[in-house]
Amino acid sequence: MIKPKAILAILLAAFALLAFGCQGGGLTAGPPTPSCPAGTKMMGEGPPNGSELWCSKTIDGQQVKDGPFFLYRPSGGLMMEGSYHDGKQDGEWTMWYDNGQKESIDHYKDGIQDGPHTSWYDNGKISAIGQYKNGKREGTWKRWDADGYKNWNEEYKDDQKIS
């Protein structure tokens, strides 16, 4: 017959294994390592010794960024993540505050901000939602205060506020 203390010890051990076993013992893997597209090579160095990682290729004798890009804060936290194509910003770009909270998501086409924009306050509350067209604010932008309650709309045409 198994003693109650032995059963308790087995249950506690099983709980600990389930609760903490998949966390890698508290070790962190460090910054992500970008997977570079074919024909490019990894450049830069992430934390703790560097602050940027990117993929690079040669176009007309010049080195240009092409593929994923990561920029880190001196503390090692991620500040910015995006992608380049032929040396120009392309696709979704995300920024983070010092506290790790997402700051903004923007979209780029051929190096120009174009598409949806969303931004947050450092407390995690939504700040603004709008649209860029050819690098300029366009259409209705919805804004909130830092508490997330008061909201208002602003209208833009060619980056000029019209209402």
Image: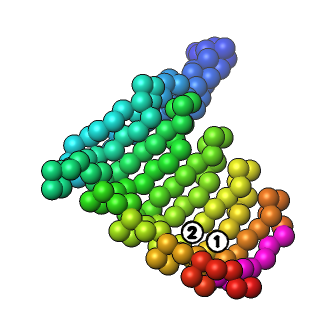
Tell me the number on the disc at residue 112: none
Q: Is residue 54 left or right of residue 3?
A: left
Q: Quadrant of the C terminus?
A: bottom right
- Locate residue 24, reporting x and y percent: 47, 28
The residue that label 2 is drawn on is: 117
Residue depicted at 26% across the width and 40% down the height: 42
Q: Amino acid at mark 2?
A: His
Residue depicted at 77% across the width and 68% down the height: 144
The quadrant in which residue 92 appears is bottom left
Q: Secondary structure at mark 2?
A: strand
- Locate residue 120, reporting x and y percent: 67, 58
**Relative vertical location of residue 61 with respect to residue 16 in this rendering, above or below:** below
- Locate residue 101, reporting x and y percent: 64, 48
Q: Secondary structure at mark 1?
A: strand
Q: CA distance from mark 2 to mark 1?
A: 6 Å
Q: Is residue 29 left or right of residue 142?
A: left
Q: Is residue 42 left or right of residue 154?
A: left
| Number of disc labels | 2
Residue depicted at 70% across the width and 50% down the height: 122
- Locate residue 25, reporting x and y percent: 50, 23
Q: Is residue 147 visible?
A: yes
The residue that label 1 is drawn on is: 129
Badge 1 density bin: few <14, some 14–19, many ≥20, Cα 10 Å: some
Q: Determine whether label 2 and label 1 are within 8 Å by CB.
A: yes
In the rendered image, residue 7 lying in the magenta stretch gets the answer: no
Residue depicted at 38% across the width and 48% down the height: 69
Q: Amino acid at mark 1?
A: Ile
Q: Compare marks 2 and 1 and give the one earlier in the sequence.
A: 2
Give the extent of the magenta segment. Answer: 150-156
Instruction: Identify the main secondary structure in magenta.
Output: strand
Q: Quadrant of the N terminus?
A: top right
